[in-house]
Image: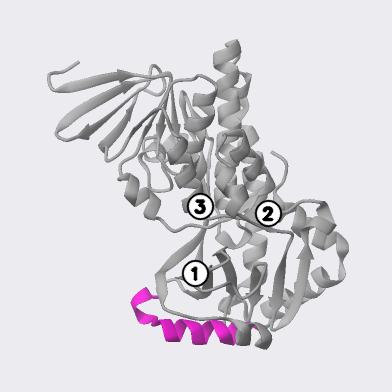
Amino acid sequence: MQEGEEMMRTQVAIIGSGPAGLMLGQLLTLAGIDNVILERKSADYVLGRIRAGVLEQGSVELLQRAGVAGRLHREGLVHHGTDLSFDGDRLRIDFTGLVGRHVTVYGQTEVTRDLMAARTATSVYEGEDVELHDFDGQPWVTWKKDGVTHRLDCDYIAGCDGYHGVSRASIPSEALTTFERVYPFGWLGVLVDKPPVAEELIYAHHERGFALCSQRSPTRSRYYVQVPADEKVESWSDDRFWDELRRRLDPATAEAMQTGASIEKSIAPLRSFVAEPLRFGKLFLAGDAAHIVPPTGAKGLNLAMSDVAMLADALIEFYAERASAGLDNYSAKALSRIWKAERFSWWMTSLLHTFPENGPFGRRIQRAEFDYLSGSVAAQQSLAENYTGLPA
């Protein structure tokens, strides 16, 4: 230990205080496993991030297991289906009738807030210059805060710090294989304090581009339109956004929609990304550090929850029984589910967005896909099964 350095010891060091890191920490704490969560941003910054909010039934069950589902059950909006629209033609996918499952609309910000409120173990915010050391042997983590260098020795490191985090970046490039597709468009999203236009989400394909009518509560709505990848949010006034959104919706929905001043407006790029493997010695990747999906299939947060549920079970097994089978199998088991979610998210994106490079033939193929879906119970069951969540 060097002069001016403070040292700590824990069993599991968790990098990142988003919902993945917080959920992993909560599950480990409930199992009596010491853990420390390290976050480079402030708690207010983490809570200020606007993200998706469609939870698979399995994610809700995991929040129940973690003891943080009380507010979700009071305020979450249970959806038994969703609507698809293609050039104004509507199709409702009846999740409950088709597969006996549902989803719950509850914002990722609220999931994070609930997990933060339940946290009783150590969390460190605003840790700068985070570095991971010796994760092939006896791992440790360092960071700086208030001019002091801190060191945390641990048994394992869980990298839950997102796509741009330090965890995946610390892995030697020759040890990592990545797969990526960057889409030539993004989602321009607006959050508004107006009641949702429909009781369930509406996914719309139009020749001008994709649109989505979503929601956060009975009084707060979230809307999106597809825009080019290089579009600037400053180019979109509220009036321009509402006019464009109406053009892409069927007339009845466009007429019923209540508009107002946006309380948040941003553009999210779309990409598909997977890193393999997810284990490097005693470092494990989970959540957005390991994979990104386009938001069309509502899989990002749910995949993160699935990852940390598997990782938590593996760590609990190790500390309870000194058995390493779960840790050894984590990467392969998680990746199997990840790639199925990547496929579904890619399929939804391909069906509902406009791809100018595909030309008229591509649009006719999309139309044929929508018509097939409309006439096939089996195809609708497949969509419902994937949307509500495949078994872990």
Secondary structure beneath label 1:
strand
Marks 3 and 1, how far apart in space? 17 Å
In-front residue for pair 361/85: 85
Residue 182 in the image, given as x and y percentages of width and height: 50, 61
Q: Is residue 151 left or right of residue 51?
A: left
Residue drawn 59% across and 75% down?
210
Q: Is residue 7 left or right of residue 192?
A: left
Figure quadrant of residue 247: bottom right
Residue 176 disc label: none
Q: Is residue 232 left or right of residue 300?
A: left
Find disc 3 in the rendering and name its residue: 108
Kindly identify the amino acid type of the residue bearing the numbered disc 3.
Answer: Gln
Residue 173 in the image, given as x and y percentages of width and height: 41, 38
Precedes in sequence: disc 3 or disc 2: 2
Name above or below for residue 266 compared with residue 45: below
Kindly identify the amino acid type of the residue bearing the numbered disc 1.
Answer: Trp
Q: Is residue 371 left or right of residue 245?
A: right
Find disc 1 in the rendering and name its residue: 187
Figure quadrant of residue 372: bottom right
